[in-house]
Amino acid sequence: MPEPDQDCPVCGARPGDDVCAGCGWTLCTPWRVGRGNRQEYDRDLAGAILAEELRAAARVADTWEPCAPWLSERPSYAQWVGALAERSEGTRPSAPVLAAALRDLPEDGELIVVEVGRDGLTATSVTYDSVNGEAIADLPWTRLLPTLPDDPAERLFRLAGGLRTAGRPALEDALREGLRAWSATWPTGTERIAVCRAPGWTLPELAARQLAKMVVAEHGDLAATLAGIAAGRPTRTGCGLLVAEVDPHGGAVRPGLLPLFEPGDLPGAKRTVVVHRPPGGEPVSLAVVTREREQRVLGVWRATLETETAVTVELTGPDRVELSGPGALTPTTAELAELIGDLPGRLDLGAGQRELVCLLELNGLAATARRRREFVSDLLELLDMEAPNRVDVTLVGYGDHSSEGRYTERLLHRSQGPAVRGDLARLPEPARSFVTGAAPLEDALDEVRVSGLVRQRVLLVVAGRPPHAIRAGRGPRPARPCPQKIDWTEALGATGANRRLAVLDGPPGDHATTWELIGANHLFLLAEATPRDVGTAAGLLPETPIRFPIPLAEPL
Amino acid sequence: MTLPPAFQSLPDDPPPSAASPPAVDPPSAVDASPAPRPAAPGRSGPSVHPDTQIVEAGLGVLGPPESGKTTLLATLPIAAEQYAPGWMFFGANDEAQDFLQENLRRLRASRTLPAATVRLNPEMRFVLRGVRKARRRGPFARTRRVQTAVYLDVLDAPGGLYAWPGPSGRSDVGSGATPSSPASGGEESDRDRLTRHVADSSGLILLVDPVLVDSPNYDAYDYIKSIVLDIARRSALSSADEFLPHYLAVCMTKCDHTAVYEKAREFGLATDDNGPGAFPTVSDQRAREFFDELCGSSWEGAPRGRAIELRDAIRSHFSPRRTRYFLTSSLGFGQHPETGVFDPDDPANPTYETGANDGSERPWVSGLIRPVNVIEPVLWLAATQLRNGS
């Protein structure tokens, strides 16, 4: 039996075995006795050639007319329908293969994905940290195989398999040489996956097999495929929310992380952690930071916190997080050093819990009486922001013994603890008329008297009128004395306060001696004092605000 | 309290209340009054029983601004209720009735004091009416019940009308008073009308504020001097002696004020020997001496200057036999808001308060109104009319 020594007459492939590997045409048969039937052979050959051409034409378009100039003969309807029916895409999905390859990719590894399409080839480098990929090389067919026809339609016909008259062996040799040269500049040792974007096309399939051992074939978009893979990948490193930790004994401050996600956590996972507002009350940065030697900031948001705030973080992909609470969040950017650089090294926690007893005169000229309340409200807010949970507040609002000639049944309104700020807003409005010259401050002092030892107690009086005396005055319009005959000097001494301050509506005038005793440590004027002035004089606040850029892990 | 004999009730009438101020010095118990006569025709007021003895008396209530004239008039009905059982004090004309109703409403319901009198109102006519015992002279004298009505024509004048004229001779009217001037047609001015009323009155009540008497703007001396000169011009010649013919009740007001009360206690005028929590009694036995003491020195013992002139002006123009002194309080003593008892450390009734929106200061009545020596000056003046047979 003679060896085949000519290219396949049907598809133009280089001869190999007796049967063409490209199209299945029998190239050589065993010797037989007798005469051959030339006409039958020619007829069979012509049919095989046309069928091969129609297969290629069917890959290019849904009609044979675009490829008509290069068909050996005009096909019948049946022949064309048959060619279309035989057309099979031979799709082999790329996502599972790419996902497996990326999952197994080492930290410093690289994967090169080569796409082979109708117009040319594109190589994309994908790493674990850059799942979206980066194009590293691009090669159109016209540059890879310059001998391909210039006519785009004919070029597609040849690429799809119409190679009988195109010098197929030479093209294939040039293809191999061109691809070798093109891929020579790629990083060595990298894994490669080829994606044939023209499934079943002769030359693209050949090129894909040439470039990679793992070949898949499908239409589509590599970026979309990689994004979908990335969205479902587990996170590689753990991460946490950046907080400040304060040593309860010495006050030393250091940064820390509240755990959020662990390696292997999948996108969609959510975690909620509770953080605490730091002193100062300024907006803070909520930063998610990785737990690894070289820590990275995955995201930063600015937020204003309540005293205690729940923060919810969602893992949206490897090294991708989103905050979904609390309240209004403003995305921003910052480096880790920048975030922790402004942390104070130490926080002065003071000598334990303190108590503030605030006596607030409720009546007076309407505008002034309201201004007193606003002042106390601002002071309490400042204490809440800068010394949260450090000051126990007792508030006593006091009215008058009588108003418009009528005896007041209840003139004291006392509140304590966390309810104080809310109760302050609900105190009775200033009365339409108030006793001239004195107010029942003595009753309020008596209300907060203590017996025995007390911890650190600050007495703050916010008022306009001095207390009632035990006996009536002797002036033309004297203030009546206290009906309960409370001696305000005795009641003042029984408050147990080791620091006393007063904020007055105006200069003490004739009652200077009285007020200097009541506000022994400091007297302020309402129009001039600030809540910080009073808080500092009371020993409850530092002179300058404390600035904390990140939240606290625990309440102070 | 013991009423003047002229005003004492008969045994079957309701007895007086126990804790009440001491008696007014009684005039002569002999009733020299004429036979009862019916009400004069043409005068306003309800019809009068033909057996009712009618006494007509003009009454001037005088005093510098803020001395409490209007408040004293307004509390007369209350004082009559509490301390002159069987006697009623009410208005006999529309002006008087409206005055009493409005001001009693203010005092009791609103707990506010009457508004300051800023103009000379129409003359008010009041009636003090009740049954008194009368005994005629003669060998067969016997006590009988006499229905008596004392009509009091009162002109409540703003204190500023009698301010002393300045160096220019113009009257500087204080307290917001807006006196009228004579119209071109010869209509009487407010001051002239007041002067005529005061001169023609048989009795005068002069209010002096012991607390304000030291104030530089409170010149009671100039006030009384101005009155005296006007009265003298019109009525001095009708007097039978060297004094003005008027009966004068000098009322030192605000005895519930701490300083006045304590001074009165020192002087023995106010005694709280009725038991713990009971209201003190205020006598007028030594009221004249108290007045002299008051004018002679301030609370701190310093001479008061013009207050002495006030005392001297009264002494020199009004007969001591026709002058009585009273320590009064229109509102009375205060009470503890919870127990209702009297507290010597806090004797005052009014509480001074300031308005939250406008900063204005005003007194408020903080306790029950229990006038002290308010009806007594009126009773004394009325008794003088009965005795004189007017």
Image (cartoon, helix red, strand yellow):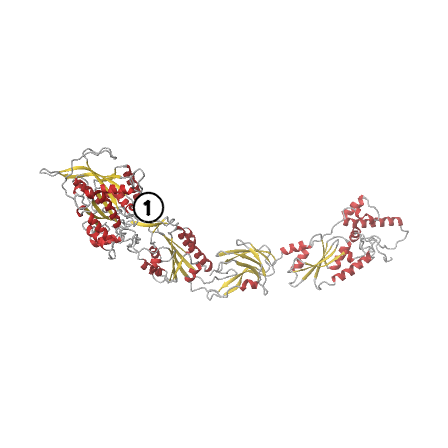
A204 is higher (above) or lower (below) than B127: below
B222 displayed left or right of A368: left
Q: Nearer the viewer, residue A70 or A341?
A: A341
Q: Which of B97 and B273 is in front in this view?
A: B97
Q: Is mark 1 on a helix, strand or loop?
A: loop
A349 displayed left or right of A154: left
Looking at the image, can residue B344 be seen?
no
| Image coordinates for residue A3, horizontal then vertical, percent | 86, 58
Q: Which of A466 and B160 is in front in this view?
A: B160
The amino acid on which the numbered mark 1 sits, given as a three-letter code, is Gly
The chain ID associated with circle 1 is B
The C terminus of chain B - image quarter: top left
Determine which residue is flagged by label 1: B176
| Image coordinates for residue B7, horizontal then vertical, percent | 18, 41
Q: In which quarter of the image is residue B146?
A: top left
Dot 1: within a 10 Å radius of its alpha carbon, few (fewer than 14), some, or many (20 or more) residues? some
| Image coordinates for residue A40, horizontal then vertical, percent | 87, 48
A182 displayed left or right of B138: right
Extreme residue in the left direction? B139
The N terminus of chain B - image quarter: top left
Q: Nearer the viewer, residue A18 or A510?
A: A510
Looking at the image, can residue B354 be seen?
yes
Q: How many marks?
A: 1
Extreme residue in the right direction? A35
| Image coordinates for residue A281, horizontal then vertical, percent | 49, 58
